[in-house]
Image (cartoon, coloured by chain):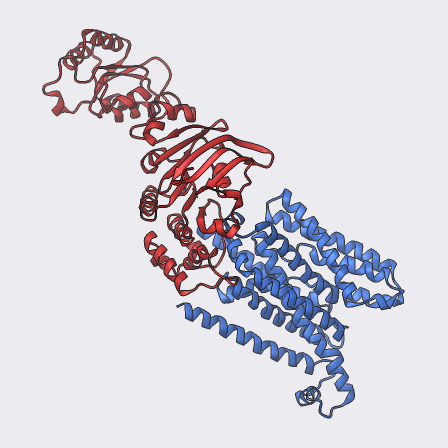
Amino acid sequence: MERGSNGKFNGIMVLLGLMILGMLLMNICIGSVRIPLREVIAVFRGGTADPVNRDIVLQLRFPRALAAMLLGGGLALSGYLLQTYFHNPIAGPYILGISSGAKLMVAVTMVVLAGNLRAFTSVTMIAAAFLGAMMAMGLVLLVARVVHNMAVLVVAGVMIGYICSAITEIVVTFAADSDIVNLHNWSRGSFSGITWNNVLALTVITVLCVIAAVIMAKSINAYQMGEQYASSVGVNVKVFRVLLVLVSSLLSATVTAFAGPVSFVGIAVPHLIRTVLHTADPKKIIPGCLLGGGLFCLVCDFLARTMLSPTEMNISTVTAIFGAPVVIAMLLRRQKEREVSA
Amino acid sequence: MNDRASIRCENISVGYGDHVVVSDASLMLHKGEILTLIGPNGAGKSTLLKTLARVLPLKAGTVYLSGQDLMSFKNRELAQKMAVLLTHGKDPGMITCREVIEMGRFPYTNMAGTITASDRTIVEEAMEQTGVRELAQREYTRISDGQRQRVLLARALCQQPEILILDEPISYLDIKYKLEFLTTLQRLVKQRDITVVMTLHELDLAARVSDRIACIKDGKIHRMGTPEEVMEGDYMETLFDLPAGSYDAVTGSVEMEKIPGASRVFVLCGTGNGTGAFRALQRRQIPFDAGILWRNDRDLPAAKALARSVIETAPFATVTDEAIRQAEKMIDGCETVICTLEETDRIHPAEHLRTLMCYAEQQGKLRDMEDLFNG
């Protein structure tokens, strides 16, 4: 029976991997200019190809697709870690205002550095986003110390998100300067304009965070049974909780630094993965979230680019359309289960 | 100094935050013993328990486990020595009972938490001993409370602990599961020579399963000893601030509060048949007197708890005229007399019973209990 469920897990992981590969190719081939798969393969193999198409593939679509995949995986993992922290599947970086906090600090940094484009590096952006994420997270944790009701905490998180967004709007309005035309689009969430430099930076951070999460997997498992239990089997709960906060904030900050705030991925994907895998084992949920989040964002970015082509929708519009119903379905199911068990 | 001492607490203080709940507590426990903490709600039983489990910080004093300072243990070492079963754990979601039980191997597994073949043997053994093998593949959130406690006990056993700490392990279980759980626990303790510290609200069961009982009240260990020493006399009533006579330490049975006012009924009783009548009268809010009871009569504890006054007399001795006169006086003050003795017991009644029944009959007060309640 054990082997059976592992077999199922492996099967689903392979399937997700293949789907990601397929979506990567679709994201590269399809867009305002359609590039045949043959030509894409030729570009990758260094063969002869149209130089315009080569640029579109290598400089625009491929880095963007890779970024969507990595950021999606990071967001889903960030959500999963926050859900572990709060012992609640409704927690996520967007709904708790952490993404908006990161957004605010990135906007402020962009405006301050507007004249100095050289300082505009991936590292600066991530650092600013991380600072903002930690500030919002700090506020959420302060609220969590006072109220122990998840519904109230979520409302507080949404409010923190609104405050940060409002301040961001003010900052963006005051800085209506030609240097930062992109700022407005970015602040609503989009994977456009990703460079190879960005991809490198976010690969490094995502890999580091994934390693941290894998190391924490054993403790996450024990922590699911409650803090006191975790501490009784030898988990250093204080250190563990700090790590959870740091890693999840860093992940959502990185996403925000490059793509702006992206809604619902952090809640919907872990829930879908838990449901499909039918387990709470972190050793399965973590890879599941990475692949599932990657696939989810690839699909959403594909739709954002192509549905109203040539106009591009912002990514949160699409993730919300698919993610929010999943969250509602999850809430309904939880309610039903509670009624059954009561 | 004490090789056999599994746990020794010296003048410890425990509490939350800045608030000290129990202070200056000392106790010593040998291997294979069960210590139960009892006392009123909020007295600090759970706080003391959680401090021993190092879930809460120790405020003052020292705790030694096998002679070594509790605070000096590394997390992992402690988890290999001591397992904890606390109430109000979190709902972990989709997880099988086997996975929950395997978590007990946490302090022994590698960084990835891999369950090896030898871990699996230990898990199987723990499931066998707690009778949860058939639950292995069931989802943990979908089993009954009684089953869940046994699964958690199996998980605790997987830690191969020398010390087991349980916070109200049977509180939400029905009586069958309560007994089953404690029976399993008692057997395991003797088999594996485990030291147990637990809290219980079930005084009757505490008296039966514990080797020693510590009573927590007013921020102190108020009394400690074997169940017989601790529960002697009316101490339980003192510990819980109960009305006199409402708790019977021998049987562990409890009575409601007696009805105030002048007695309206006199109950002639004995051999245990009176107890039901006392309770029936109490439920109907009728104050009553009872007698004449030998001090070894099974009706005496309930009578003392529920009757306005009870005439009692030395066991196996002839009832004195004085006691009879006293009873007659009480009958004079009542509207009704009921006799709870079975017909077969009334064929050759004792002298005093015959006297009192005649006395009541003459006054027209002797009635059946059913008539009394229906009329």
Query: Image point 44% across, 57% down: which residue?
Result: B105
- Tell which of B161 and B218 is nearer to you: B161
Query: Image point 50% across, 52% down: which residue?
Result: B76
Query: From where the camera sits, is residue A307 visible?
Result: no
Number of marks: 0
Please determine whether, in this image, residue A51 is positioned above or below residue B327.
Answer: below
Query: From where the camera sits, is residue B147 visible?
Result: yes
Quadrant placement of the N terminus of chain A = bottom left
Query: Image point 39% across, 50% down: which residue?
Result: B153
Q: Does residue B311 appear to the left or right of A183 in the view shown?
A: left
Q: Does residue B94 appear to the left or right of A243 in the view shown?
A: left
- Tell which of B245 and A302 is nearer to you: B245
Image quadrant in which you'd find residue A332: bottom right
Q: Residue furthest left?
A: B348
- Tell which of A134 and A87 is nearer to you: A134
Please determine whether, in this image, residue A322 is positioned above or below residue A334.
Answer: below
Query: Image point 26% across, 27% down: which residue?
Result: B276
Residue A75, position as x, y percentages in the image:
65, 64
Q: Residue furthest front?
A: B1
Q: Residue furthest bottom?
A: A48
Image quadrant in which you'd find residue A290: bottom right
Q: Does residue A157 appear to the left or right of B98 in the view shown?
A: right
Please determine whether, in this image, residue B79 is positioned above or below residue B311.
Answer: below
Residue B41, position as x, y percentages in the image:
47, 32
* Chain in red on the image: B
* Chain in blue on the image: A
Residue A42, position as x, y percentages in the image:
69, 90
Residue B331, position as x, y percentages in the image:
25, 11
Image quadrant in which you'd find residue A61: bottom right
